[in-house]
Every structure is written in structure tokens, then in C-alpha cells.
Image: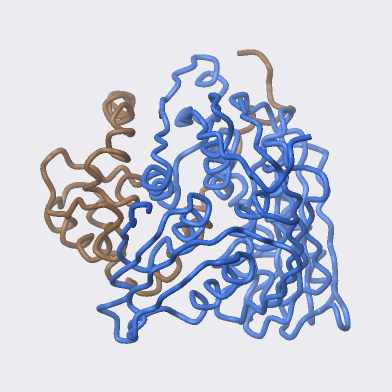
Amino acid sequence: AESVYHSKRRPNLMRLIYGDRKYTPEQIAQGDIEEGPLKLSGDKGSDSDEGFGTGPGTGAEDDSEDDGDFLTLKKEDSDATIAQMIDSCKSTLEFTDLEEWDATEAKDSIRDRFITGSLDV
Amino acid sequence: MSKILKFEGHNYFRQRLVLATLSGKILKIEKIRSNDANPGLRDFEASFLRLLEKVTNGATIEISYTGTSIVYKPGVIVGGKVYHDCGTSRAVGYFLEPLIALGPFSKSPMNVTLNGITNDNVDISVDTIRTVLLPQLKKFGIEDGLELDIPVRGAAPNGGGKVIFRCPIVRSLKPIQFTDEGRIKRIRGVAYCTRVAPQFSNRMVDSARGMLDYVNDINIAAVHYQGDKSGLSPGFAISLLAKTTTSAFYSAELAGGPGQAPEDVGLQAARMLLSEIRKGGCVDSISQTLVLLMMVLGPNDVSKVRVGELTPFTIQYLRDLQDFFGSTFKITQETDNDKVVLGAAPDTLLMTCVGIGYVNTNKKAT
């Protein structure tokens, strides 16, 4: 199912980025894309402030899956998060996601990216 | 008379000014925090505009009375010896990052001294700029004399650090073909501390090493800055870098705050590095924007690079690159079977573009 999802989504990436620009960069990066029309204004370059403003609004529209969670969470600590996200190419620090690296499976999953990993494919 | 490009909002402020400077297009930014309780430009943004005035000649910046809109008419990049106090609202990285993009196209080589906070968790630290961003430029043919000295450290909140950035000028860039990410062969890093116990650096290094036991070739320098090299506030931070057989870099960094144990900082930084490695690609998320910009500015030839997941910042950057230079990237996901089996990041993207043939006319052809 995941591969189907990706094969559907990826070819659209150019269209999402360069197309009518109705999604904010954050939505594209999160894969938070709904096929239905959104109410975001699509004019050039306006997806900064307004994007954040309408973010929670779109969250109310698509209460499916965990994407809604992400957007409501953003609303709660809005100012702090936005301040972190503006104008720094350093992505926001997500400490909770990092715990997964304590598991052996996670550590093994990237072992072949190192020269010490197995070479047989 | 070139067309005026209009943008709204305070986000992506620096990149738009930099792209306007490089492209020579007039830029208007409106609605800068117009709905905020404290509208208009922040002090660090004003400070960045002042820095931009120092490294260019003939630029005019008109700021509206309320500070919520600016019109920027770029001049020529002159470079030379510049001093700038970055203040303490944002770290030195905020100011240095755009300078790296402008430096190679300046009239005379840049020699910029910046004062302020060298490491924090908002902007890229000077260590990462030195070890990751600058080596990226080398792939485009910017090599001799490109350096960043860090004589004095400065942690938040009071800063007091000092860095010296020197950048050579080039006439034009080389195109790059960088699609083989290779395998990681070594891990490097810098852990520094100022005005805390000297052991802090070693403690960060030990915990980070424990997490990164994939290769033997790990060398994380533990440095303790003392006396007049230590800035005005206590602080400690670690910057990590994984280098592959094909010279791709992955980086992660973290600064410690009051009350944090150095072990935790080292461990978190190491985990962040693992996350970055899993994303894959030949360019890590911090250098995505710089590499893409240099690809656009390259000669009229095809440049190709493999990147990991695009960050929101990069996506907006792609849009802005299109607005300023009319360049679009071809973005393809390569389903290379080998890679999938290898357990390498399956989500890497191939970014292809044709450079606009940007030429720095100040540099004579040799």
C-alpha cells in the first residue's frame, strides 16, 4: 500500500511545487496533500504567513489520519514553532522521533549505508 | 527596467534578498508581520539589511513607515573587508549563510568579520558551515582561499563570538553530476564548550560515539575554549558529520542549554545524524538550498544531484528560484532496485536543471 501511495504521489511533486502553488511547503513536505480543492490562496509567494494561518483550517477539513494531529499541534504552540521555522534551513528539532534509534532494528536498518555493512545485494 | 517581484510575509526573507541581489531584480516584500502585535521588521532582519548594504554598492532599500513593507533595489556585490555585529537575536549563521551565496560573485574577495552568537539551535552553527557548507562549494569549483576561522566562541544569550569568513571570487561555476551517494566511511565532529567544566566536551563526545559504532573511523574533536576565546556566555555544542566514499556529507548538530546534561546533547546529536543518514541523498538537508542555488547559477549545462527528502524550506526555495531566475528543476524519483535492496533511503530524488550561465563579470577570464 505504501508503494502505491508513493508511486501516486511522487510524480506529482513537480506539479505540487511549481504548479498552482496552492499548498504550503510544509504541507508538501509532510505529504499532507488532499486531492480536493483547498481554500488556500494560490498567488505567488504568499504561502508564508497565510499558509500558517490557514493551516489549522485545512486540518479541520481533513480530519483523516494523523495529519490532523500534526496541524492541531502546530496551532497550540504556534508562535514558538513558527519562530523556529522561519528563515533557517535547519529543520525543526523533533526529539520524540529520535528515541526510535535506541532500538536495534532501527540501528540495523541503516547499517548497509556504511562501508562496514554487508556488500552482497 | 526589470519587473518588480512582489512577495508577502516575513518568511524566507533572506533568500529573497539574496536572489534579488544575484538576479538584479527589484524586490518588494509586503505585509511583514502586518497582523502581529509588534508589526514590521525585527532587529535581526534590519541588521541583515545593513549587512547587505555593506557588501554591495548602489543598493537602495526603502522601508515603509510602519516597517511592514520594503522595496529593495539591488546594487553590485563589492565584497572586500567588512565588519558586522550580528547582535544577539539570531546567530552568526543567519548572516553567514546568505554571504556564502553572494561571496563567489563579488567584485573583490570577501573578508567578513562577524560578531555574535556562534552556536545555537535556531541557525546553522559556524562549525557546520565550516565543515559542511563550504566543502559543498568546492564541488562547484570554488576552492582556493575559501575558509572560515572561528577565533572566539560565543554562546547564547550574550554571544561575543567572532568568526572571519574569506571567500574567493570566481568567474563562473562548474556544473555538477553528483548522483552516487556512496557509503559512509568516516565520522567527524567538533564538540566545544566555553565557560563550563572542560569535561563537558569529552562527555558529549563519549555519548555520541557510543551511538555511532558503525565505523571505526570516528574522530570527534573535544575543544575547550578558555579566557578571551570563550565569549560572554557559558555554552556547549556538538556538530557531527558523516562522510561517504563519494564525498557526500550528512550532518547534524545540537547546542546544549542551561541544565542539560552534555551526555544527552551528544546522544541526541548522534541520533539526529542517524536520521539524516537515513534520508539519504548526496546532499544533506542543511546544504540542499545552497547546492540547488549553485546548480541554477552554473553554466548552460545540465547539473544533476541526488537529494533526500526535501525540507519545507527547500520547497519554498525552489519556488523562489523559479520566480527570480525562471529555472525549474526536473524532479524524478529513481526506483533503482539496487538501492532498495541495500536498505538505502528509497525516497531520494534526482534533481536536474540547466544552469542559467551566471557570469561574474568582475573576474577576468584566465
Q: Where residue B123 sits: x, y (%)?
A: 57, 65
A39 in relation to B89, above or below: above
Q: Where residue B238 sits: x, y (%)?
A: 71, 61
**Residue A70, quarter of picture:** bottom left
> Which residue is at 74% across, 54% downward?
B167
Q: Is residue B41 visible?
A: yes
Q: Where residue B326 sits: x, y (%)?
A: 39, 39
**Residue A110, quarter of picture:** top right
> Which residue is at 68% across, 21% downward?
A118
B218 in relation to A14, above or below: below
> Which residue is at 64% across, 43% downward?
B250
Q: Nearer the viewer, residue B42 or A30?
A: B42
Q: Is residue B173 left or right of residue B201?
A: left
Write down which chain is painted brown.
A
Q: Nearer the viewer, residue B190 or B351?
A: B351
Write down which chain is painted blue.
B
Q: Nearer the viewer, residue A23 or B257?
A: A23
Q: Is residue A78 left or right of residue B84?
A: left
